[in-house]
Amino acid sequence: MYRERIQQLFGGEVVSSIRDNVYLLERNNRRYVAKVSNNSFNHFVYSSELYQNTAINDPDSLLSKKIGFRYDGKNYFVLEKYVEGDTDPETIRAIMPGIFYKIGVFHRENKAEGRVWSMYSDGRKFDSIEDMVRYEFSYHESYWEDTKTLDPCLSAVMNLTKGFRTVLHGDLHLGNVILRDSGPVLIDTEWSALSLNMFEFEHVDFFGISRDYSEKVTDNALDCYRAYFYALGINEKISNELIRGYNVLKVMRKNTYDRYYKNYEDLKKIPGLLQRVLAWPASGMEQISMPVLPAAAP
């Protein structure tokens, strides 16, 4: 339904539909991906502003960045280069630690000042990481029934302020990696944000918190953390505090979701998940160790 409008805005010819509201466009013998959204709050806007207004240091072209953005008064339209390469999930799964090493280098080189936001901040931007984290914690607190665990949760989550603000891909999972001879390329950057570095681990699930879906990283999740922190030179103590803090926040997100949607069976898992995360690192649980495992090197 958007074919003609895309052609009017970007030129070229829409040759096929890839999936709902995503189209393949050919222009001047080159291929592009055009995406459409009509949300009132739109991450397309924030991510497009980020790429337009931020000098991003990415000599390896790790991120497939937006090259066009239009708003016609009703819908948002984004244009990206079409990237060809290997998308086999098992091949990509095996090299995810190496990709997180690369994203750690990318984060280090793209620390930036500015207001921060995340997909969980309801479109709000914040002056600091601390303000953003406190806002989200307060929201989840209203859904949290075990008041005795709130203080240790808050203590763990506030350790996220030991992270830093940087440019995120924002939606890094197995389905958004394409392998080329020149190296991996991360596509679908409409969730890119200036935000807390740890939020790049949205789809890395070492503790078994998230629902099951094929794109998430599980088997070598710990190696992804190892590779990332090694790339940044962050010591073991801080690494463990960041892992604990971020995953406590993920448990609280899950609790909020399950209470809102009345997933009572899943709610029964929350106390055990929280206990496991708060105990990190503990006897019988593998700790982050430096340096990174050889298998996680880029």
Image: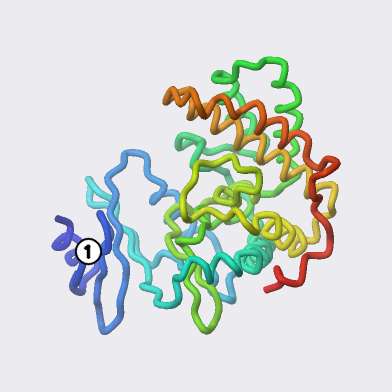
Question: Which residue does the image show at 67% across and 35% down from the upper left?
Answer: 248
Q: In the structure shown, which secondary structural element does the residue marked by tag 1 occupy?
A: strand
Task: Classify mark 1: residues with Cα within 10 Å, few (<14), some (14-19) or many (20+).
Answer: some
Residue at label 1?
17
Q: 53 or 178, which is in the foreground?
A: 178
Q: Residue at x 49, y 79 (%)?
A: 180
Q: Residue at x 78, y 65 (%)?
A: 292
Is residue 109 visible to us here? no
Rendered view: 152 above or below 298: above
Q: Position of residue 219 (x, y in %)?
A: 62, 57
Is 223 on the left-hand or right-hand side of 169?
Answer: right
Q: Position of residue 36 (x, y in %)?
A: 28, 54
Side of 44 where 228 appears, left or right: right
243 w.r.t. 25: above or below: above
Residue 210 can be seen in this image: yes
Residue drawn at the location 33% of the way across and 59% of the way down: 78
Q: In the figure, is residue 233 to the left or right of 7?
A: right
Q: Position of residue 13 (x, y in %)?
A: 18, 73
Q: What amino acid is at disc 1?
A: Ser
Q: Nearer the viewer, residue 246 or 285?
A: 285
Q: Position of residue 138 (x, y in %)?
A: 60, 24
